[in-house]
C-alpha cells in the first residue's frame, strides 16, 4: 500500500518522488494503521486510508523542509513565521477522512456512583 500512498502524496503535494518521501509515506502508513479500531484493517477503509496517509506524509514533509521563517529583518528585528497552519490542516484532513475507522481517543467513561 506504500506505493499507492506515495503516488497520492506526489500528486497531491506536487512534489517529486524521493527516498525521504517514501520513508515518510511508510511511517504515515504505520502510524495510521496503529490508530485503527481493533479488528479494522487498512484495506477495510477503502480509499480513505491511502489518502489520509498521503496527507500525513505531506504534513511530515512540510515539517522537515520548512523552518517556518518567511521573513527576517535585522534592523528593528522582525521575524515572521508561517507554515504551521498547513501542516495542522493536512493532519486534520487525514483524521477527518479516517474518523469512521479510528479508535475513540477523546472519550472515557469512568463510571457513576449509584
Image (cartoon, grey):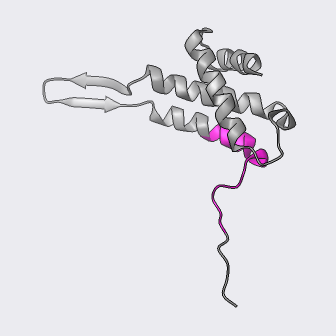
In the visual, does 72 lie left or right of 92?
A: left
Q: Could you tell me how many numbered marks the image carries?
A: 0
Nearest the viewer among 39 and 18 is: 39
Quarter of the figure that contains the C terminus: bottom right
In the visual, does 41 lie left or right of 60?
A: right
Which contiguous range is marked in magenta? 92-108
Image height of 8 relative to 76, above or below: above
Find residue 20 and report its horizontal and vertical position in percent: 55, 14
Find residue 99 and report its horizontal and vertical position in percent: 73, 47
Q: Based on the picture, tell me whether residue 101 belongs to the magenta stretch.
A: yes
Residue sitting at 63 percent across and 58 percent down?
A: 106
Residue with the most extreme left position: 75
Residue sitting at 45 percent across and 19 percent down?
A: 65
Residue sitting at 53 percent across and 22 percent down?
A: 61
Image height of 12 relative to 112, above or below: above
Residue sitting at 72 percent across and 21 percent down?
A: 5
In the visual, does 103 lie left or right of 77?
A: right
Find residue 8 and report its horizontal and vertical position in percent: 72, 19
Q: Based on the picture, tell me whether residue 106 belongs to the magenta stretch.
A: yes
Quarter of the figure that contains the N terminus: top right
In the visual, does 48 lie left or right of 64?
A: right
Image height of 12 relative to 19, above or below: below
Find residue 108 and report its horizontal and vertical position in percent: 65, 66
Picture quadrant where residue 97 is located: top right
Amino acid at each position: 500500500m506504500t506505493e499507492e500512498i506515495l503516488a497520492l502524496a506526489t500528486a497531491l503535494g506536487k512534489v517529486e518522488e524521493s527516498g525521504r518521501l517514501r520513508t515518510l509515506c511508510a511511517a504515515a502508513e504505520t502510524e495510521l494503521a496503529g490508530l485503527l479500531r481493533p479488528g479494522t484493517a487498512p484495506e477495510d477503509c477503502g480509499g480513505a486510508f491511502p489518502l489520509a496517509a498521503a496527507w500525513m506524509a505531506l504534513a511530515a514533509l512540510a515539517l522537515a523542509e520548512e523552518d517556518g521563517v518567511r521573513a527576517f529583518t535585522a534592523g528593528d528585528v522582525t521575524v515572521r513565521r508561517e507554515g504551521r497552519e498547513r501542516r495542522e490542516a493536512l493532519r486534520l484532513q487525514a483524521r477527518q477522512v479516517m474518523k469512521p475507522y479510528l479508535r475513540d481517543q477523546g472519550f472515557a467513561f469512568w463510571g457513576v456512583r449509584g
